[in-house]
Structure formats: structure tokens, C-alpha cells
Amino acid sequence: MIETGSPQGARKAEGIQIILDSLNDINKDEVIYVGDAPSDIIASRKVEIPVVAAVWANTAEPKKLQEMKPDELFYTIKDFEDWLLERI
């Protein structure tokens, strides 16, 4: 499933919720949003799912992301991968 933005404006939380609603057999505690912008953290909080910050992204602003207090913050893809593997 793919959800995109809207010409009418920001709808990230709505898009996330649409995807969550389509995942009938998956609980919110089995989902994580990976984002590189403060708006990703805000949207994830609105729909009450965990969010991690991808500080490795070229577009990321580490200081802003730290201030938003994501559930986790990763500076490298490898660190994120290791974190995921620990949870399997």
C-alpha cells in the first residue's frame, strides 16, 4: 500500500492512519515510523505509533529531531539495522 501527500496540504497523520486501518492483523505496537523530519514525529505521535528519527538522511536536521524527542534517534543506517535486529 502506498499513501502520498495531497495537493490540499499536509495530511501525513491521516495517511498513516489509513495505512494502519488497512493492516487488520497488526497492532500499533508492531509498527514503527522512520522519519527524517519533525513533521514525521508530530504525525506519528498523533496516531500514537512509535517513531524513530533517521538522522543519517541528507535532509535531516539533527538538533531539531533531538528536540522532538523521538523514541529512538539513529545517525547511521547500520545503527538502525542493529537496533532492529535486536528486536527480532
Image (cartoon, helix red, strand yellow):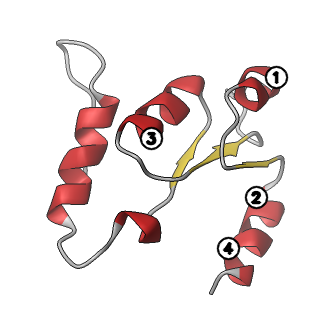
The residue pinned by badge 2 equals 77
Do the residues bearing badges 2 and 4 touch, measured as CB atoms within 8 Å? no
Q: Earlier in the sequence, mark 3 or mark 4?
A: 3
In depth, the one of 39 and 46 nearer the eye is 46
Do the residues bearing badges 3 and 4 touch, measured as CB atoms within 8 Å? no
Callout 2 amino acid: Ile
Q: Using a 10 Å C-alpha cutoff, classify the residue at mark 3 as few (fewer than 14 neighbours), some (14 to 19) or many (20 or more).
A: many
Do the residues bearing badges 2 and 3 touch, measured as CB atoms within 8 Å? no
Callout 3 amino acid: Ser
The residue pinned by badge 4 equals 84
Q: Earlier in the sequence, mark 1 or mark 3?
A: 3
Of the two numbered discs 2 and 1 in the rendering, the one whose residue sits closer to the viewer: 1
Q: Secondary structure at mark 4?
A: helix
Q: Secondary structure at mark 3?
A: helix
Q: CA distance from mark 2 to mark 1?
A: 18 Å
**Residue 3 appearing in the image:** no
**Residue at 67% in and 43% down:** 53
Of the two numbered discs 3 and 4 in the rendering, the one whose residue sits closer to the viewer: 3
Q: Earlier in the sequence, mark 2 or mark 1?
A: 1
Q: CA distance from mark 2 to mark 4?
A: 10 Å
Residue 19 image offset from top left, x and y in percent: 23, 54
Q: Which mark is residue 63?
A: 1
User: Would you identify the image quadrant in which residue 82 lies?
Assistant: bottom right
Give above or below for 6 relative to 25. Answer: above
Q: Which mark is residue 44?
A: 3
Q: Secondary structure at mark 2?
A: helix
**Residue at 73% in and 20% down:** 64
Do the residues bearing badges 1 and 4 touch, measured as CB atoms within 8 Å? no
